[in-house]
Amino acid sequence: MAPVLVTGASRSDQALPPTESETLHQTTAKADSELRDLVDEEMLPLEVDSSTLRAFGSYRGLEIWSAENSFDSPCLVAVHQASDVLSEWRCAPPAADLIMDVSSSGDGFDGFEGLTGDGIIRFLLRGDTVHADVYLVPEAD
Amino acid sequence: MDASTPPSDAEQELDDLRRRAYGPHPDIQADAAALARLTELEAALGGSPPGAADAGVGTSAATSQAAPWDDSVWAQSDPDGLDAESPPEEEADQGRLWSAWHWLTATPARRIVAAALTAALVITPTVAWIIGPHPDATLHAIEDEPDGVVLSLLDFLGADPEPASIRGYDPYRGYQPWFSVEKGGRQCLMLVEPKGPAVDGANCVPPGVELFSDSNAWRLLGDNLQNRLPHGSMVRFQYRGDSVDVYLYSSSDEG
């Protein structure tokens, strides 16, 4: 089920239902040194503490991790498994909904694994889980 | 009930509960179990509560004596005969709604429940609006056409917008949101720092998906236009069509 309120705004303009949704749970996987180095390097301005990386498994070709930064803000990281690069990352102060939109195009992407069509996966950190909604651009008539 | 017959235990219990519900100092609304028992006894024993008519809470014989889901209530719920021309399914739906309402209001105890439900339905959205987040600013669409800076930044991002779709909004703390629709159908919101010029945030989503763009204040990126906010803070620009709502999230705020 799609989140009713995802942007911290009381009014929702959401009209397109997600193509599919998934809830990702934390796993016992540990970040290896390669991933920690990647986070330290790519996310340097965000001041993420790579020792806090927690795994949430993979979804549609993306490995999802959470972490904290030096401002005590939670962060989300998406690793594109096929290329081992960081596809997207976001940090938000605790008072805000932490939302990370990953696009199906650009940055070496050629669609999401197992899905056809152009769109995004919207990841939302919710406590100990990460909610994922897939939204695809409707086919033209 | 025959006045010469001593009341049964159930009738006595009903009287006691009715006093708590309709007496001068009603307290039954705080006692869910008692309220449920009153409803149960009124359904089983029927009758009007003492003084109900005087208190203006009496009901017609048709509603107060009708059993739940009694078809006779449906028949009397359409005094204007409007339902006679309704399609059968619609008529059935209306009948069920009327029947549910009549059942809820058939006895004084149920009316208390109905009032509480009605209040909850009215109050809940209001409370949600009051306690929900409110924008720190609302930016309105401007009449200006996109200038060369905006167009070059769109080009730099590899965007392919429909020219007529590009629309700007009032600036906020040095940022100006620009909305556009890609030829592929995505809707985009780009945060432009005209003084850079630079793009500080951009997001594109399929049509119908909530569109926003975030900008964070990172100290390692030097002095930026959010310098009145603590480092680590975030500004969220939420697209609303004719306007863009702005939400400030300070890194010092608790979650």
Image (spheres, helix red, strand yellow):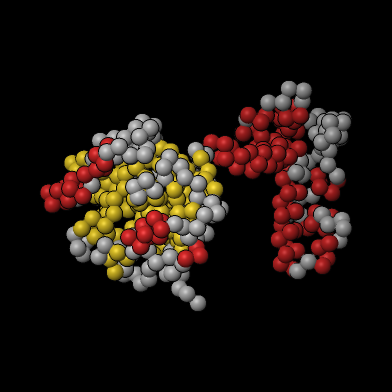
The answer to which of A23 and A76 lies nearer the viewer is A76
Would you place residue B240 above or below residue B89 in this image? above
Residue reaching furthest to the bottom:
A141
The residue drawn where x is 50% and y is 63% is B165
Position in image of residue B144 (x %, y %) = 52, 54
Q: Is residue B71 left or right of residue B232?
A: right
Decide if residue B16 is in sight here.
no
Position in image of residue B87 (x %, y %) = 76, 69
The residue drawn where x is 66% and y is 31% is B29
Position in image of residue A131 (x %, y %) = 37, 52
Decide if residue B227 is in sight here.
yes
The residue drawn where x is 41% and y is 58% is B148
**Where is residue B95, by image quadrant?**
bottom right
The residue drawn where x is 29% and y is 54% is A88
Residue reaching furthest to the top:
B25
Where does the C terminus of chain B fall, quadrant-wise?
top left
Q: How many marks?
A: 0
Would you place residue B205 above or below residue B67 in this image? below
Q: Is residue B144 left or right of residue A32?
A: right
Residue reaching furthest to the front:
B148
Would you place residue A71 above or below residue B24 in this image? below
Where does the N terminus of chain B fall, quadrant-wise?
top right
The answer to which of B6 and B44 lies nearer the viewer is B44
Position in image of residue B14 (x %, y %) = 73, 32
**Where is residue A82, by image quadrant?**
bottom left
Q: Is residue B180 left or right of residue B84?
A: left
